[in-house]
Amino acid sequence: MSEMICITCPMGCHLHIEQISDTEIAVTGNRCHRGEAYAKEEILSPRRVVTATCAIDMSSGVANSYYSENIYRPRRVPVRTTAAFPKERIPELLSQIYALKVKLPVTAGQAVLHDALGTGIDVIATRTM
C-alpha cells in the first residue's frame, strides 16, 4: 500500500492506494471523485508538462541582426509541451529539445517540434523573439 496527497483541489486529501493488478488500483481517503482519478493517473500513467530551453540557430541572418540591435542577447528559446507528456519518456524528449536549433523569428505559441516522439504532443516556444 502506498500513500500520497491529492493536489487537484485545496482539500489535500490523504490518499491510500492499493495496487490490485498492473492496470487496476483501489483508492481510499478521497473526499471527491477527482482524488481517485488523480491517484489512478499518477500511479498507472504519470504525465508532466515539460519546460526547457533550446538553442537559437546563430547562422541565420535574422539572429545576427536581432543580436546586433539588442543589448540583451538571449542564447536560448524557452519552450514547453502543449500537454502533459509521459513521465518515463521525458529524458528522451529533453535530448531531442536540447538538440534543436530554432531559427528566428519565433513567436510565443509557435510549434518548434511537432508530434514529439510520436505522442501527438507539440513543443512550443513560450516567448516571442
Image: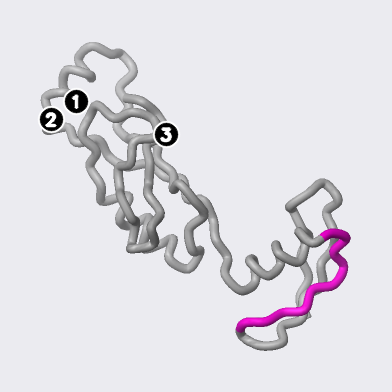
| Residue 24 in the figure: left or right of residue 63 | right
Q: Which mark is residue 81?
A: none
| Residue 67 in the figure: left or right of residue 94 | left
Q: What is the magenta range?
A: 23-32
**If you read the primary sequence from the N terminus, does the residue marked by circle 3 or circle 2 appear first?**
2
The answer to whether 101 is drawn above or below residue 39 in the figure is: above
Quadrant showing the N terminus? bottom right
Where residue 81 appears, x then y in whole percent? 44, 48
Q: Crowding at label 1, few (<14), some or many (≥20) Cα neighbours within 10 Å?
A: some
The answer to whether 13 is drawn above or below residue 114 in the figure is: below
Label 1 element class: helix
Pointer 3 residue: 126
Pointer 2 residue: 60
Viewer-proximal residue, 78 or 19? Answer: 19
Pointer 1 residue: 63
Where residue 101 appears, x then y in whole percent? 22, 42
Label 3 element class: loop
- C-alpha gap between disc 1 and disc 3: 17 Å
Give yes or no for contact between labels 3 and 2 (Cβ–Cβ under 8 Å): no
Viewer-proximal residue, 61 or 9? Answer: 9
Residue at x-position 20% and y-position 34%: 103
Q: Crowding at label 3, few (<14), some or many (≥20) Cα neighbours within 10 Å?
A: many
Please identify, in this view, whether the residue under mark 1 or under mark 3 is nearer the observer.
3
